[in-house]
Each structure stands twice: as structure tokens, then as C-alpha cells.
Amino acid sequence: MTVNLERLKERFEVISRFGKIGDTGVCRPALSKTEREAFDVVAGWMEQAGMTVRVDHFGNLIGRLEGKNPNGPVLMIGSHLDSQPYGGRFDGTAGVLAGLEAVTAMAERGIVPEVPVEVVSFCDEEGWRFQKGLFGSRGITGRVEPEELELMDRDGITRRQALRDFGCDPDKLHESVYLPGQIGAYLELHIEQGPLLERQNRPVGIVSGIAGPLWLTVTLKGRAGHAGSVPMRERRDALVGAAEIVVALNRMVQEEEGVPTVGTVGSLRLFPNSPNVIPEEVEFTVDLRDIDMNRRRRIEERLREAIAQSADRHGLAYSIRESANLQPRYCAEWMKRILHEESQAMGLEAPELMSGPFHDALVMADVCDFAMIFVRCRNGVSHSPEEYASYEDLALGTKLLYRGVLRISDQLSRRRRPTVK
Amino acid sequence: MTVNLERLKERFEVISRFGKIGDTGVCRPALSKTEREAFDVVAGWMEQAGMTVRVDHFGNLIGRLEGKNPNGPVLMIGSHLDSQPYGGRFDGTAGVLAGLEAVTAMAERGIVPEVPVEVVSFCDEEGWRFQKGLFGSRGITGRVEPEELELMDRDGITRRQALRDFGCDPDKLHESVYLPGQIGAYLELHIEQGPLLERQNRPVGIVSGIAGPLWLTVTLKGRAGHAGSVPMRERRDALVGAAEIVVALNRMVQEEEGVPTVGTVGSLRLFPNSPNVIPEEVEFTVDLRDIDMNRRRRIEERLREAIAQSADRHGLAYSIRESANLQPRYCAEWMKRILHEESQAMGLEAPELMSGPFHDALVMADVCDFAMIFVRCRNGVSHSPEEYASYEDLALGTKLLYRGVLRISDQLSRRRRPTVK
């Protein structure tokens, strides 16, 4: 036995206690005390597996298993331990614990990889706390802008302050950036967060690529006034304008049949938010995704038109801020081939599928080859306490990860140093 | 000179410092420390005018000027010092300071009224903090339900706790309820909060009646899920459902031309409120007002239908809670006649107009005759820092109030004790 299902399960149970909501839910904000507690426990397990552990200045937890060639390109495996505000126990955590389990299994069998293997829990993948995610992976790849440190959470705490409270030094971020070529490949296991593997009755899938999301933050500003006296025709009601846009977006992403376009307004706040006051200002986010970038662009254009029209109709000023605009990224053929071969050897028929949700892998794709393993989840539900994947499926995915790590680390030591992209 | 414009103005300036926002705005929540500070200052002015002052167990500030007949029916004048979360300095405050000024003017001239005159600042007229307003006036008229004490504000503080922190005893509320017939009449000055006086170029108006508002709280519950992976057709997005209802309400109140119907969604919150999570639950308020109760009822029915249809379309569970449902109330003919006569004697042509916003007078109407004086405000704006009325207009309204108080108190001593309604 390589991967230990019982140990894996027990570790999921332990980690799910940090930020537990109800029976099955989790709220573990990035850079919070609960995340730090989870880090400390995982760090202990990493050390038990013979890894050297550090929390870098971006708030990433990184465990390193030394390779025969300590200067060889690193094989990085990981995901994230931060969760949605009302999330489940598998999203992110699965990739960290699976990576840890793969390394633990190697240590138990006395396997020393050819190149260093690092298991990472990236800081703030989810992005809801400071309204900009993938922080840790963008950090180590040199893609964090200095202004981001001033972004504030709902309690008025800046990212800079949160990093400090977490024990990081935001003035030393540059020390935590990897050199070009230092990371040879990135491998991530994640629950699917969609319904396809379940429909095909397959426990594990191999990812072909990741759809790039467009994130917009739209602000509409009208005029407050008394809900009992300002005549309807004289109003500049920001919420009515926003509601029209929410309805329009929902319609336009569904017009073309049989395509995977998705559009969501997930966050919205209004001001002053009082029952008998006409809303003066509304801010909301738009999340728009498609594998087909041309279609995504066409819908974006129409959405911008709808925003302009609604603002015009209701006398509102508006602004649109783009907080993410990512291209789709495709997994490395050679890494996919290894995963397909290993899954066949395990007797799994692992289908290939696209990822609608993004992951830290989308960022890592900028600096190295990457691949991803998906594990079936129930009803395609994620970002919810109802999120569920069986430990048997997770163990199968972890076993494929383990086999992948052995072959990919081996391959990395033989490949020419990849050119910097 | 009876009413002192300079003193009135200075007192507005002083009170507007408690909870000041920006240059002209005010946030003075009911039962807050800032309201208490404003109470203390007003209480001092009341005492200077020879009134005895108390804060009752509902959190009302009441100053009493004794009458020649201390057992005669009380003439109550007042309004409220609590403000909207993002409000102006005139709404509510005008009525309290005008009442105080009228009594001060009487004291300065050595006038002892026939019946007791009480100046009151009612607790929590605005109702946003605990989502149920007109608390103080409902309190003294025996219309507060015990459950209301458990309503919580956004910080989880109950009304019961807030009353205690304010120095009131929520177990002794009954001691602060007036006996039937004890209040003879109620008179309130308020800024118009609408555009009609300004359009007619008149500083002061006499109110004919108050439109009754319907307040509903609507909750829609769908299912959370990942914004990047759950296909559009499988979603149960509570915000899309809510947005359709906001749009539908806005349309249906505007269908009939030239009527004063107004409908507003002023408050809305969603859960979990994260950019890449499909909204699971949305709660919003509906404020619907009309002078014509039949029309209001027809629109309410159509709104309820629209809610049911939208919930059905998006697979949402829903509930509708009625937090206020008030009938329109009309001012007493004899009090209006006095105000008309006095305004003519002052050389004012004070038009009669309906009030869209409600006031504590709407509640007082249940137990006694009432009348209201409106003062012109700029652009009809209220519940906003842009709210503005000139001190000259306010002084004119206050002078009319003063003259009204003299005659109404006189009249009350001669009228038969009004029958309990």
C-alpha cells in the first residue's frame, strides 16, 4: 500500500475542524487565525514526512522534500487551505493533503526524488476577503502589484496588516519570489466542482485546461432620498439599475444553447441599505467564464452595453473595474500523458475534462508546465457546506498523484531546463 | 418677536454635531450613545424653559410644561432625534427643536397654557436599526409587542439590551404607557421630504393626512455553488430571482400615470456574498405606499404573484413577512382650521398637502386628534446628507407651531374630553 486512506481521511477530519460551520461547512478566511492554526498542524505533518517547512512572506505554507539534485527544478504540488466564507471541507484542502500524503508515502518507502518536491498551501486562492485571489501563487511568480497590499477586508483590515498579523513581512515580499526556471512543473489535485465525473461514473479525471475568468466590479451611483416621498419619475435608484443588469447578464449567458458559458453576480452591497431610503450606491461583482475567449469577449461587450444603458435609463453614474481577466490555460501534454498512463496502469478510465473554476495552476502556468487531477464530487456542488467527495475517490486521486509525482520528478531531472516563458 | 431664529439656528448647529457625517450629514442611531448625548443637551434646554424632563422606559425624551389644569388632556408636540444611517440634520430634529422653541417662547412671555404641553423626542422613529420603527410613539400608546424587544441590530444587540444600555428598564414598559384620554392632541412639525412646497414657492404647508406604508421583508433561498462550474440551467440563484422582483416592482408602481404610488427596495443582503459563489439566500425589504388603499392592495397582490413566479422559475423557496401595514390617517379638521387661520394671520398662504412619508403622528392618530406642519425643503431630498431647509423657513413653521400651540391648548381645555378611540 502506498497511499494510506485512513490517514488521509483522519487528516481531512482534523483540518475541517478549523473554521467549522454546522456539521459539514467550513469558513477559513485567508490569513486568519483559523488558517494559521490549520497551517501549524499541516506543518507538523510535513516535518514528520521529513520536509523542511516555512511560511513565506506571501503567507504561503511550503514544505520541501530535498531531491538528489537540490539545485534541480522544483516539482511543486499543492492547492490552498483557505476556504469560501460558507464553504466545504474539500475545496483546496484536498490538494494540500493529497500532496502531503504523496510525499509521506515516498518518505515511508525511503524514496528520494531526483529533484526537490515542494508541497504548498497557497495564500488566499479564494479571493473574497480582499476581493482579489490567487495571491500566493501570483506572489511567488512575481505577479503581485504593490497596491494590492492596501486592499481592505470588510472590517477595514488591509492585506498588509493581515500579512503582518500572520507573521509575514510585507516589506520583504521580493525575498519570496522564485527565480525564473526554479519551478520545473506544477501538479494540483482538486475536487471537480462540477457534475461531469459523477455523470460518467468515474472517480478521477485528468484536466485538459482551465477556463479563464473575467472578474468585474461594477459601481452604480444614484441619489438617496425618502422612499415615501420622492416620486418614481424623479428617482435615481441604483438598485433598480443593478437589478436590471443582473437579470440581463443571466439572460445573455443562456442565449446560446449547449455551451459552457457561465455568468454570476455573487457579491453585491448597497448603500445606505435602509428599508425606506432609495439606494444611492450599489457595488457588485461579475464573474464571467468561457472556454471560448471570443464568445466571452462578445458577452462582455454586451454586458458593458447593458450597464451603460441601465445607468442612462436611471440617471446613474457608473464605473467598471476589472479585477481579473485571465486567458484559458492548457495542461502540458507530457504531464497529461504520464497521468493517463498511470491511471490506465491503476485500472482507472480517467476521462479528460476542462475546468470551469480556476485554480492556482492557472497562475503557475505562466512560469512552468502544469497538470491537474480532478476527483469526483457529489452533484457538482462546491463552495457550499454541501460539498462532498468520498474518501475512497480522494484516495484514488491521491494514488494517481503519487505515481505522477514519481514519474514527473524523474522526468524533470532529465529534461532540459525549461525556457522562461 | 416670539420665535427666536438665531437661537433655533444655533440649536440645529449644536445637535447636528452628534453623529456628524461629512459637512452636512448625520448618523444618529436610535438608542445610541450619540442620541443619548443629543438628548442630554436638549434636556438642558427644556429645563431652561421651565419644563420637567424625563426619559421614559421606551427611550422617549419628554419635557413637560405644566398647565393651569395639570389634569387636563396633554397637548403633545414633537418628533424624533434619531436619524437615518446616512441622513440629514433636519428630518425629525426640526420637530423637536421647533416644539422646544415654541415652549421656550411661551416661557419667555410668561404664558402658562391651559393644559400641560409636552415636547417629546420619540424613540426610534426611523426603524432601520431593529427593522421596526415608530417605537416610542407605539410604546406610549400601548402598541409595542413584547417580542420586539428581542429584535437584533446588525451587531447582534437586541432592542432589550439597547434600552438597558440607554438607561431604560425594559421590564417596566407598562409604566410609560399613557392612559386613554390622557393625550388630548398631537402636533408635529416636519420638513416636507418632497418637492411640492418648493414647486409652489411656499415656505410652509398644512398636512391633510399621512399615507400608510406597507413594509414587507422577502427572503428567497436557493442553492450555493461554484460560479465557474455549475451550468446555468442547473442553478438556483437567489439573487437573479430577487433582481427580477426588484425590476418588476419598479415597473408595476409606474404603470398608472399621475398617481402618487411609490415602491422601493431599500435594503437587500445576500449570502454568502462572495464573487465566485452562486448566491444561496437573499433577503430584501419592500416599501409600498399609496394614499389609495385599494390601489396599494392591488399592487401588493401583483407583487406577491411576481415573487411566487420568480421563485418558481429559479427553484427558490421563499417567505414574505409583513413588518408594517398601516392605513392612511387624516388630520383633525378643527386643528387644521386653527393652523389655516393662524397662517393667514401671519400672511402665509399655506397649501394643504398629503404626506407620503409616515411620522409618529400616524401612530398618535390612534389615540388622539393630530395635525402636522410641513416646512419646505430643497429638491424634495431627505434621508440624505443633501437634505436642506432654510432656517428662515423653519422659523416661519415654528412660529405657526407656536401660534397653533396657544390656540390648540386653549381649545383642549374647553373641549369635552375626547372619547377613547
Image (cartoon, coloured by chain):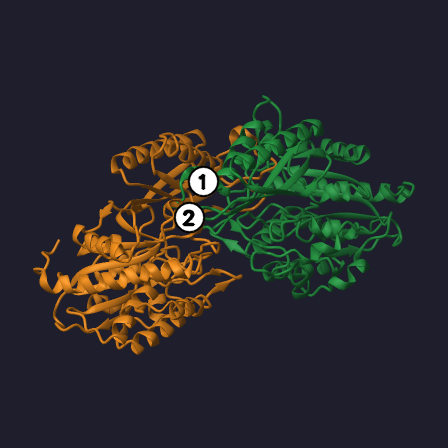
Chain colours: A green, B orange
| Amino acid bearing label 1 | Glu
Query: Mark on residue A17?
Result: none
Q: Is the residue at mark 2 from the same chain as the one at mark 1? A: no
For residue B124, say whether it is visible: no
Q: Position of residue A348 (x, y in %)?
A: 68, 32
In the rendered structure, are the residues bearing label 2 and label 1 in contact, judged by CB atoms less than 8 Å apart? yes
Which of these two is toward me, A265 or A239?
A: A239
SS for callout 2:
helix
Query: Mark on residue A234?
Result: 1
**Residue position marked by numbered label 2 in the rendering:** B380
User: How dense is the environment of label 2, judged by Cα within 10 Å: few (below 14), some, or many (20 and up)?
Assistant: many
Q: Name the image quarter holding the N terminus of chain B.
A: bottom left
Q: Quadrant of residue B285?
A: top left
Q: Is residue B338 left or right of residue B239?
A: left
Q: Position of residue A86 (x, y in %)?
A: 53, 49
Examine the rendered structure and indicate whether residue B19 appears above or below residue A185. Answer: below
Residue at 9%, 61% (x, y): give it.
Answer: B417
Q: Quadrant of residue A329?
A: top right
Q: Is residue A168 left or right of residue A25?
A: right
Chain of the residue on which disc 1 is drawn: A
Examine the rendered structure and indicate whether residue A7 appears above or below residue A34. Answer: above
| Amino acid bearing label 2 | Gly
Residue at 60%, 56% (x, y): give it.
Answer: A153
For residue B137, say whether it is visible: yes
Q: Position of residue B321 (x, y in %)?
A: 32, 44
User: How dense is the environment of label 1, judged by Cα within 10 Å: few (below 14), some, or many (20 and up)?
Assistant: few
Which of these two is toward me, A386 or A250?
A: A250
Q: Is residue A207 left or right of residue B159?
A: right
